[in-house]
Image: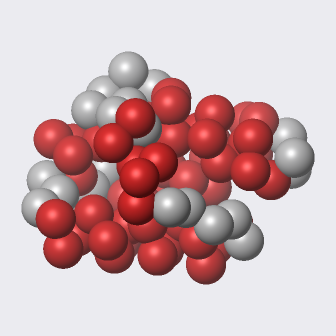
Amino acid sequence: MEREELIAKVNEVLAEEFEKEVSEITPDADIKQTLELDSLSLVDMVALIENEFGVKIKPSEMPQVKTFGALYDFIAERMA
C-alpha cells in the first residue's frame, strides 16, 4: 500500500469510527485531542488499527504515537 493510500485509509477509518470530519485529521494534529479519546476509546482505536491494517500494537508503544503523522509512520513500519 502506498503511503498516500495508507494515510487516506487511516483518516477514513478513524473519522468514521469517531464521528469526525476527515479534514480534522492532519499529520500534526494530536490524536487524543482530535478524536476526543479517553483510555477506553484509545483501546478501541488500537483494536481498530490492528484489525484494519493487520498490525500488532503493544500497549507500551502507544504513548510515543501522539500525532497522526506518527501513527502513519508507525503503521507503515509495521506493514513493511
Report the residue at 33% width, 42% height from top: 63
Q: Tell which of 36 and 62 is nearer to you.
A: 62
The x, y position of residue 59, in whole percent, is 40, 61
Q: How is the image coloured?
A: secondary structure
The reply to whether residue 13 is visible in this rendering is no
Q: Tell which of 64 and 29 is nearer to you.
A: 64
The reply to whether residue 62 is visible in this rendering is yes
**Is residue 3 shown above or below 45?**
above
Side (left or right) of 53 relative to 34: right
Q: Quadrant of residue 43?
A: bottom left
Report the residue at 27% width, 63% height from top: 42
Q: Tell which of 46 and 64 is nearer to you.
A: 64
**Is residue 38 shown above or below 76?**
below
Report the residue at 13% width, 53% height from top: 36
Side (left or right) of 28 relative to 37: right
Side (left or right) of 25 relative to 12: left
The x, y position of residue 55, in whole percent, is 68, 65
**Is residue 10 shown above or below 57?**
above
The x, y position of residue 32, in whole percent, is 21, 46
